[in-house]
Image: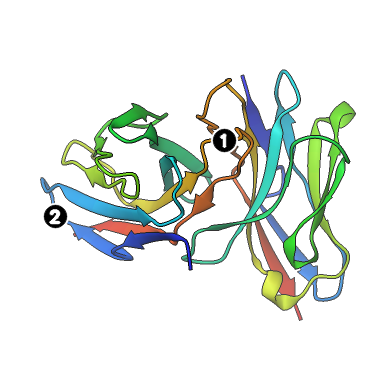
């Protein structure tokens, strides 16, 4: 069965430090992978997506993610964190059922805190 | 600006009462989704619709109902049969094709029990 695991429930980093949020998935083929960010009381905003091709994808707000098939991972990175990056981050896998469903399976999220 | 509007932002339900959450999109998207979010559990799919007048149950449909009479609207009713309705509800939509299109989300409705 398809699944997504975000091993870190909560991470604290200092402003200006680098960041890596982990995401591991279980899927029988190449999945569609997404990272979303959620500020408190808000909806989810798409940061970046991977479908095929270059395994390093760039997103908004200076984020990037690398797809590693051998490790079934799609980790999110940022070289220098800003205080405004404090939020909850969700990794999602999009199984393709051959139709228009595009049902997403979400991880349980990683809450990022940024220290001044 | 195109987007997804959810209303109200906060909603309170009395015991035995049905309440309806609104979701409207002006993105001309065919597919729409309802998710429930609880702390530490990520997002769980309640219902989804790929076209007007058609919808399917998601993973946790019990106690909920939906309709899709118009392309831009996908209201969710939380019925009295849903015994634990307190949660944050998110509506999403996407273009039907290509199939790898991402979902776009509204700002959510927080439902609480009085």
Which marked residue is nearer to the observer: mark 1 or mark 2? 1
Q: Nearer the viewer, residue A39 or B102?
A: B102
Q: Nearer the viewer, residue A85 or B66?
A: B66
Residue A112 in the image: above or below residue A69: below
What chain letter is assigned to the residue under label 1?
A: B
Which residue is labeled 2 in the image?
A: B14
- At 49% across and 54% down in the image, what residue appears? B105
Q: Is residue A84 left or right of residue A44?
A: right
Looking at the rendering, in which quadrant would you find the C terminus of chain B? bottom left
The image shows residue B52 at horizontal and vertical percentages of 32, 36
- At 74% across and 67% down in the image, what residue appears? A61
The image shows residue A90 at horizontal and vertical percentages of 63, 49
- At 72% across and 42% down in the image, what residue appears? A7
The image shows residue B51 at horizontal and vertical percentages of 38, 34
The image shows residue B93 at horizontal and vertical percentages of 46, 46
Which residue is labeled 1 in the image?
A: B97
Q: Is residue A103 left or right of residue A58?
A: left
Closer to the chain start, of discs 1 and 2, is 2
- At 63% across and 29% down in the image, what residue appears? A3
Residue A8 in the image: above or below residue A63: above
């Amino acid at each position: 069965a398809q699944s997504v695991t975000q091993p870190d429930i909560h991470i604290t980093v200092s402003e200006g430090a680098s960041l890596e949020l982990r995401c591991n998935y279980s899927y029988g083929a190449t999945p569609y992978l997404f990272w979303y960010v959620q500020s408190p009381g808000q909806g989810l905003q798409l940061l970046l997506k991977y479908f095929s091709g270059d395994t390093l994808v760039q997103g908004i707000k200076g984020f990037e993610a690398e797809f590693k098939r051998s490790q079934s991972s799609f980790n999110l990175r940022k070289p220098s964190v800003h205080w405004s990056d404090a939020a909850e981050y969700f990794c999602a896998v999009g199984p393709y059922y051959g139709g228009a469903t595009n049902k997403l399976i979400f991880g349980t999220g990683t809450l990022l805190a940024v220290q001044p | 600006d195109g987007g997804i509007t959810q209303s109200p932002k906060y909603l309170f339900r009395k015991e035995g009462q049905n309440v309806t959450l609104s979701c409207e999109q002006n993105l001309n998207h065919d597919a729409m989704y309802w998710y429930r979010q609880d702390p530490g559990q990520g997002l769980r799919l309640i219902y989804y619709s790929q076209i007007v007048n058609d919808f399917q149950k998601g993973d946790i449909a019990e106690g909920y109902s939906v309709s899709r009479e118009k392309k831009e609207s996908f209201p969710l009713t939380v019925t009295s049969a849903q015994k634990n309705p307190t949660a944050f509800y998110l509506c999403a939509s996407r273009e039907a094709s290509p199939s790898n299109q991402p979902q776009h989300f509204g700002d959510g409705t927080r439902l609480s029990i009085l």
